[in-house]
Amino acid sequence: VQLQASGGGLVQAGGSLRLSCAASGSITSIYVMGWYCQAPGKQRDLVAFITNLGDTNYADSVKGRFTISRDNAKKTVYLQLNSLKPEDTAVYYCNALKTTGPPFWGQGTQVTVSS
């Protein structure tokens, strides 16, 4: 499985971005896709995930501001980031889980929010 993340950038506080993660390769039996973020010097934390049934889950810090969605036809998962805060600044990584085996990771996309 290959995951190609895109959509990061520099935005002012209160602004919005949309991240995309396109999956290719052996994508059958992927049942969860999600986004993680990692700020400098910090661990990689879960931001949101979506299951193949469309169930979603969000970190408390992003509830009401971020929305995860998927387009099965395009094999792409999106993360809409609204009302961005400087503390959202991080590298955002796309992640995919199959029913067995280790997770797959995309290359990361930088999100920088200026105050």
Image (cartoon, helix red, strand yellow):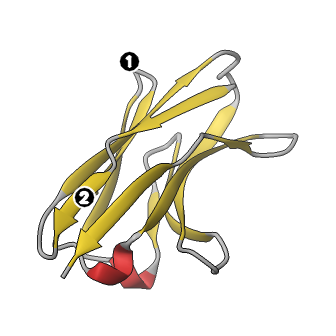
Let me know if residue 65 appears in the view. Answer: no
Q: Say above or below: 114 vs 5.
A: below
- Between 104 and 49, the residue placed more toward the observer is 104
Checking the image for residue 10, the label placed there is 2
- Between 44 and 89, the residue placed more toward the observer is 89
The amino acid beneath tag 2 is Leu
| Quadrant hosting residue 58 | bottom left
Q: Say above or below: 95 vs 98.
A: below
Q: Which quarter of the rendering shows the N terminus?
A: top right
The amino acid beneath tag 1 is Ala
* Residue at 32%, 65% in the rendered image: 112
Q: Position of residue 45 (x, y in %)?
A: 60, 72
Q: Where is residue 72 in the image (x, y as percent from the top left)?
A: 41, 25
* Residue at 53%, 73% in the rendered image: 39
Q: Which quarter of the rendering shows the C terminus?
A: bottom left
Q: Name the residue under label 1.
A: 73
Q: Say above or below: 88 vs 105.
A: below
Q: Say above or below: 63 vs 110.
A: below
Q: Where is residue 26 in the image (x, y as percent from the top left)?
A: 70, 17
Q: Residues within 10 Å of mark 2 (few under 14, many from 20)?
A: some
